[in-house]
Every structure is written in C-alpha cells, then in structure tokens.
Amino acid sequence: MLRALRSFLFGESGSTTADWIVLTSGVVGLGIGAIAMTHTGVVDLGMDVSTSLSGSVVDEPEETRPELLGSRQYSREEWFSYTIGDQTFNGMAYVDSTEESWQMPGGSVWTKTTSTYRDSGFWEEPVWRNERGQVVSAPDLGSA
C-alpha cells in the first residue's frame, strides 16, 4: 500500500492532462473576462443603432418611381349600341376624359386615361397604355 501511494505522488503520467486543464481553464477565464468587459459597450452600441434606425424611413430612389409629366382633359361624343333581351338601344353619349402622361423608370412614357359619361355619371376604370399603345397593368405609383 505504501508503494502505491508513493507511485501516485511521484508519478508523472497525468501531468500533461493537468497542464491542459489549467491552460484551457485560463483561456475560458480570459474569454469570460473579455465578454464581461465589453458587454455594456456592445449593448449601448446596439441601443444607439436601434434608436437611430427606428426613426428612419427607407424610400425608393426617385428614379425608380413613375413621374407625372402632365395631363389634359377633353370631351368627345361616342356612339353606343347595346342589347337587353330582345331590345336594342342606340344613341350618342358625351364622354369627358382625363389623360395623364407618366415617365416610367426605364424612360418610356405611358398614358393613363380615365373617362366619365356625362349624362349618367358612369365612369370607366383607368386604362394604362405603354409607349406602343398597348393596354398594360397599372404600375405602382408609390407616393407620386
């Protein structure tokens, strides 16, 4: 028994493991210390960034929005004919229209036409046409 105790006390086979444990605990301790020292500053910086960004409004650059170039109003007479059941109605309607020209982001000019039938007050959905005169879907005008 005395020999086993002496072998344990003077043996060097576990010293490498003990060295690594001490070294690793020192590195972990330094990491925890570094975090403790910088924690307050990092939190304050995060709050400053949050405060400055919370009041910001991200908006599209102006060149990505359509721009209204101008508008004109005109009136015209339009012949109509429609059938309900076995009766056909024919006549002349007076139409007031507004035509707007819009500069699109790519440089082309589109037109938007809105018409109102004078006697009935009935109005048509706006019709958008591209630079070739083709009917297209309405673009997103944003806050323009």
Image: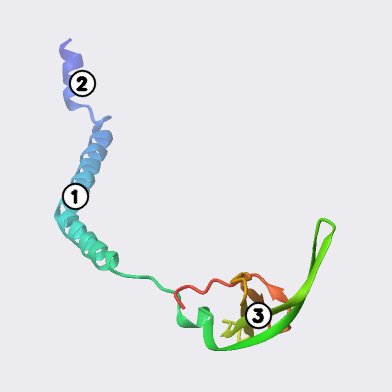
Query: Circle 3 is placed at which residue position?
Result: 95
Q: Which is nearer the N-term, disc 3 or disc 1? A: 1
Closest to the observer, 18 or 37: 37
Q: Which element carries disc 1, helix, strand or loop?
A: helix
| Dot 3 alpha-carbon crowd within 10 angstroms: few under 14, some 14 to 19, many 20 or more | some
Residue under label 2 = 7
Label of residue 13 in the image: none
The picture places residue 57, in percent across and down from the top left corner, at: 34, 70
Residue 7 horizontal/vertical position (percent): 20, 21
- Eye-nearest disc, 3 or 2: 3
Residue beneath the point at 25% across and 42% down: 24
Rendering quarter of residue 86:
bottom right
Vertical order, 27 against 63 (above or below): above
Amino acid type at circle 2 is Ser
Whole-angstrom CA distance, mark 3 to mark 1, is: 82 Å
Three-letter residue code for mark 1: Leu
Comes first in the chain, label 1 or label 2: 2
The image quadrant of residue 76 is bottom right
- Pointer 2 local density, CA inside 10 Å: few below 14, some 14–19, many at least 20: few
Tell me if label 1 and label 2 are in contact, CB under 8 Å: no
Q: Closer to the N terminus: mark 3 or mark 2?
A: 2
Q: Quadrant of residue 13?
A: top left
Answer with left or right where residue 7 lies relative to residue 121: left
Front position in the image: 69 or 73 = 73
Q: Is 89 above or below relative to 28?
A: below
Residue drawn at 29 percent across, 66 percent down: 53
Q: Residue at x 82, y 65 (%)?
A: 88
Give the residue at x 63% y 86%.
Answer: 109
Tell me, yes or no, whether the two marked residues, 3 and 1, touch with CB atoms within 8 Å: no
Q: Which residue is mark 1?
A: 30
Question: What's the distance in space between the residues labelled 1 and 2, CA to CA?
Answer: 35 Å
